[in-house]
Image: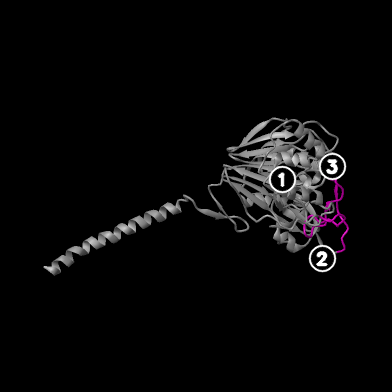
Amino acid sequence: MKEHRKIRLIPFFILLILGFGFIFTKQTKSNQKGLSPSIETTVGTKISENNSFTMHFIDVGQGDATLIGCDGEWMLIDAGDNTKGTTVQLYLKKQNVSKLKYVIGTHPDADHIGGLDVIITKFDCENIFMPDKASDSKEYKELLDAIKYRNYNITVPQVGNTFSLGSASCIVLGPIALSESNNNNSIVLKVKYKDTSFLLSGDAEIEEEQDIVDSGVDLKADVYHAGHHGSKTSSVHNWLNKISPKSVVISCGSENVYGHPHRESLDAFKEIGADVYRTDEQGSIVVTSDGENLMWNIDSSNTWRAGQEGNDIILDSTVVRGVIEETGESEVLINNDSNLTKYILNNNSLKFHYPDCKSVPKIKDKNKEEILTTREELIKRGYEPCKICNP
């Protein structure tokens, strides 16, 4: 009898084991469906896929470029200077951006709109916003040529205009009045995603900041993209106190000639207790929101180090080109580094050539760029050497 009982118990144990296996398999499949998985950012910080809002402050040296994504829709604000168009293009491709719902050139300075001609040419763009302020600069004319080439129209946003990016809402706060200054004609934008908010002000200085404060609009924001690269001509106390940001992001180039960020601005940010993030020290900075909380791809800076005025400016680590004056005009700087070589870029095929390569005359003008840099730098930026001239 005892032996018979043992035999009868065997099927029961088999069923029990199979039952646990089924539960384990089901749980594993549920996890694979992505109920609450995480993904790696470019620097390794984990961000939940449930966060459908991201803001990227792209490192373009001494300039601005901000990419905002929400629910699969994208907006780009500025694109650095004339040497950074391809840098921004490659950054967008890495984020799987194929279409831009909005492209905003905050104002005509070269370090903001210089790279936008590449973006306009390479991406489908639904809406292009620019202020009612023209410029005689080469960069501005190239941008207009690109817009004309794609048969796009320019919209001049008005104060109070609102528009949506996915489930995020955007409102135009400035410029309230036209100014002779490019900086004080900057498009100022507040972006709100559920209970989190962001304020971006281009190069707006004291005059435009005061106009907006006087308008009585709600400026309060969790994240403030510091005006004019952290210059003391922006982010004055009454403006900053109205925003009352928890975090401040400064876009500027390492050892830039203007001394950005200025000590006065850093002291003001410290006084209000804001965390400071800066592209000159930390590279591209990414913040994501789940609607209530903000998550960053890197810890805030704790150096509180002001820039040093009068340094030679090189916007890329080896590219000898830069902005000399705050008017935004750009020109090639003199540099004695004999390791630098002149190359011709094809920004469509992402190939680089020697100037006398027989392929160069075949490159369309809109895709051609002459640059003084190193072979290693171009490869690092995603270009490949031509197989004919073997640069």
Other-residue count near label 2 (Cα within 10 Å), few / some / many at <14 / 14–19 / ≥20: few
Residue plotted at (86% across, 35% down): 180
Q: Position of residue 237 (x, y in %)?
A: 77, 42
**Residue under pointer 2:** 339
Q: CA distance from mark 3 to mark 1?
A: 26 Å
Magenta span: chief secondary structure: loop
Q: Amino acid at mark 2?
A: Asn
Tag 3's secondary structure?
A: loop
Q: Is residue 106 left or right of residue 75?
A: right
Query: In the current view of this chain or complex, which residue is farthest to the bottom?
Result: 3
Q: Secondary structure at mark 1?
A: strand
Q: Is residue 322 above or below residue 133?
A: below
Quadrant of residue 358 within the rendered picture? bottom right
- Nearest to N terminus: mark 1 or mark 2: 1
Give the labeled residue for mark 3: 137
The tag on residue 225 is: 1
Question: Do the residues under discs 1 and 2 have CB atoms within 8 angstroms?
Answer: no
- Point out the tag, 3 or 1, that comes first from the N-terminus: 3
Comparing 244 with 56, the one in front is 244
309 falls in the magenta region: yes
Q: Which residues are magenta?
A: 307-336
Query: How far across and how far down the image is residue 58, in percent?
Result: 70, 50
Q: Residue at x 75, y 42 (%)?
A: 202
Q: Label 1 is placed on what type of residue?
A: His
The N terminus: image quadrant = bottom left
